Amino acid sequence: MSAIHKQLVTDEEGRPVGVLIPYEEWLRIEQQLGTTDGTDGIKQLQRHEGMIHLSEDPVAYQRRLRDEWA
């Protein structure tokens, strides 16, 4: 893999909070990772559709747990 030309983004206190890379390099990285299926991630999420089968409504579960705290 070749070197990536990057620029660190820092906050007011000098701590790194992000990285900027040229768009062409980003496209190359995506291609190498095999993640070029849409930039919004919908296709990546669709492959997980229907994978989780819940026995209880998530909101009801959360309320039941919170009631236990009181």
Image (spheres, rainbow, N blue to C red):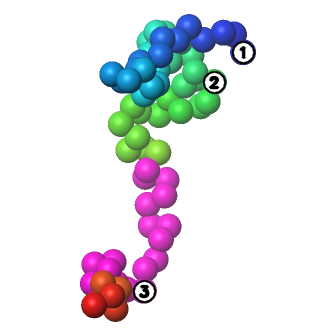
Query: Residue 33 at what x, y percent from top left?
Result: 61, 30
Badge count: 3
Disc nearer the start of the sequence (1/2): 1
Point out which mark residue 41 bears. Answer: none
Quarter of the image for the N terminus: give it: top right
Does the CB distance between marks 3 and 1 fall below 8 Å? Answer: no
Q: Is residue 27 left or right of residue 62?
A: right
* Frontmost residue, 70 versus 66: 70
Residue 30: percent from left, percent from top: 54, 25
Residue at 33% over, 22% down: 12
Residue type at numbered disc 3: Ser
The residue carrying mark 2 is: 32
Q: Which mark is residue 1?
A: 1
The residue drawn where x is 43% and y is 50% is: 45
Mark 1 to mark 2 CA distance (whole Å):
9 Å
Pick whichever of labels 3 and 1 is earlier in the sequence.
Answer: 1
The mark lying in front, picked from 1 and 2, is 1
Above or below, 25 relative to 58: above
Q: Confirm or deny contact between disc 1 and disc 2 (CB under 8 A).
A: yes
Q: Nearer the viewer, residue 10 or 35?
A: 10
